[in-house]
Image (cartoon, coloured by chain):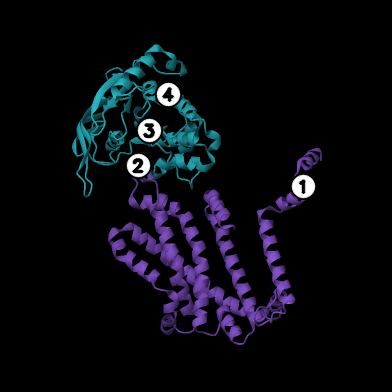
Chain colours: A cyan, B purple
Amino acid sequence: MTAVSPAIVLRGISKTYAAKGRPNTLALDNISLDIAEGEFVALVGPSGCGKSTLLKLISGLLPPSNGEIEVFKATVTRPLPSVGIVFQSPVLMKWRTIYENVILPLEVMGTIDASSHDRVMGLLELAGIRDFAQSYPRELSGGMQQRAAICRALVHNPPLLLLDEPFGALDAMTRSQMNMDLARIWAQTRKTTVLITHSVAEAVFLADRVVVMSARPGRITEIISVEIPHPRTVDVRGQPKFGELVQQIGKHIGFEFA
Amino acid sequence: MAAENKLSDQALPTKVSLWAGLGSFGRGIAGVVVVIILWEIICRAFHVPEFILPAPIAIIERLFTEWQLLAAHTWVTISEMVLGFALAVIIGVLAAILVTTSDRIKDVAMPLIVITQLIPKIAIAPVILIWFGYGISSKVVIAFLIAVFPIVIDMATGLTMIERELIELLRSLGASRWKIFMKAQIPNSLPHLFSGMRVSITLAMIGAVVGEFVGGSEGLGYIIVVGTSELKTALVFAAIFVLTAVGFLLFALIGWVERLVIPWSASERDELMKITGM
């Protein structure tokens, strides 16, 4: 990655959850990380290492207990509309068609204009679900619903994309296909992206840097650069370098898996 | 035609395929018809006196001969039911919104709502007649009191049982509480509201009829009380038949409105229909 101004700056972030009748839980401990504009960063780590919390802090949905978060040079103090979020489940409104779901951010932000229709249809086309614009979510498979969720995250053209285990609920084949599609969509949009995943292979396949976190309290234990050029296609998985990186990161997490 | 022949070649013995050919709805009707025929046979075979158990044909006869009387009283009962039900929906929905919007209101109101529900309505029906008179309004109030609870509970469930991530997504887009309420909570609650309404309408009928039992001079409940005291059992059964038919029609009407208002929820409703056998 060339040296560009950081899109996200995390400085000494800690997050403590207070729970009634139990000692406070330290979810994140002293996290510092810079993410460059246009960079794709993957966060991997065991369950409960505070990855999702970190994403909520970046999006401004939660305030940090300590430390400072800057997104595009502004301190985050409230929820940011400049982010697109994709969750593990598609979280589509079942009473809206796919089209109506994807246009939702524009509607909420009050920015629907003459170009909105083309924008939505263009994204649906990009995600390969254009034919389902007028279908209801229940008529689509899990993978297609998640594609719609990705379209919705992109529709207001946010400079920042936050993906919280977006493919965690999909079967292996769909997941692999979604990885290719995300790589393709990302290559076209080049948005600053933070991806949370449990799959090291997914992290290596998609990201410029893989950030490894430890179990609770979440700390950054390792940052590994993935120097494989974009756009990445299915061939990447066959490269020796890919396998090496997956093994290396797997060891950092503390178990072998590819 | 060729395909048809092939199918019938493979078909199981004729008896079974006739049974299968009826479909689940047809089989349901067949069951009802068999019970009615057995009923008729038993009444005739054992010479059961009409004032104890009138035969189906006698009841149908009474439906025709007394239709004017029945129609007038049916109208009264339907009015009580529908008004009580409408009140239950309006007040139930508002109560659910209040209870789910503010924890303070919830803390105060929930015990009151539950206690109100725990009071046996039949026990307080006479008091309600004292308060609201022997006319239609006391029956409307009783119908309302019985019918409101499932509306409050189901609506409150629908307003709160919503994916946390969806609320987070809307918040991240800068949606106000009002927008989240209108765009997410209200539509999310509609399937729950309709299932509450289906329970509520049958309860409203019970409320109206109980009110008529306790006092008054109108309605199918009144016909049942007077008919019983005069041993006009066939008329009583005719009134019960009309009540059942009215309940069924209003229940079906809610299903029909639901299909119009929330077509996106069709699959869930169909599942429910399968369970309840509707």
The crowd level at tag 4 (other Cα within 10 Å; few <14, some 14-19, many 20+) is: many
Residue B29 in the image, given as x and y percentages of width and height: 68, 61
At 29% from the left edge and 58% from the top edge, which residue is drawn? B103
Label 4 vs label 1: CA separation? Answer: 58 Å
Instruction: In the displayed orientation, state which residue is furthest to the top.
Output: A240
Between tags 4 and 3, which lies in front? Answer: 3
Q: Quadrant of residue B69?
A: bottom right
- Which SS class for mark 1? loop
Where residue A159 sits: x, y (%)?
34, 31
Q: On the rendered image, what quadrant is the C terminus of chain A found in?
A: top left
Structural crowding at the residue carrying mark 3, measured as other residues with C-alpha within 10 Å and reported as few (<14), some (14–19) or many (≥20): many
Residue that label 4 marks = A183
Q: Residue B173, labelled with which disc?
A: 2
Mark nearest the camera among 4 and 2 is: 4
Q: Nearer the viewer, residue B247 or B37?
A: B37
- Asked if the residue at tag 2 contacts the one at tag 4, i.e. Cβ–Cβ closer than 8 Å, the answer is no
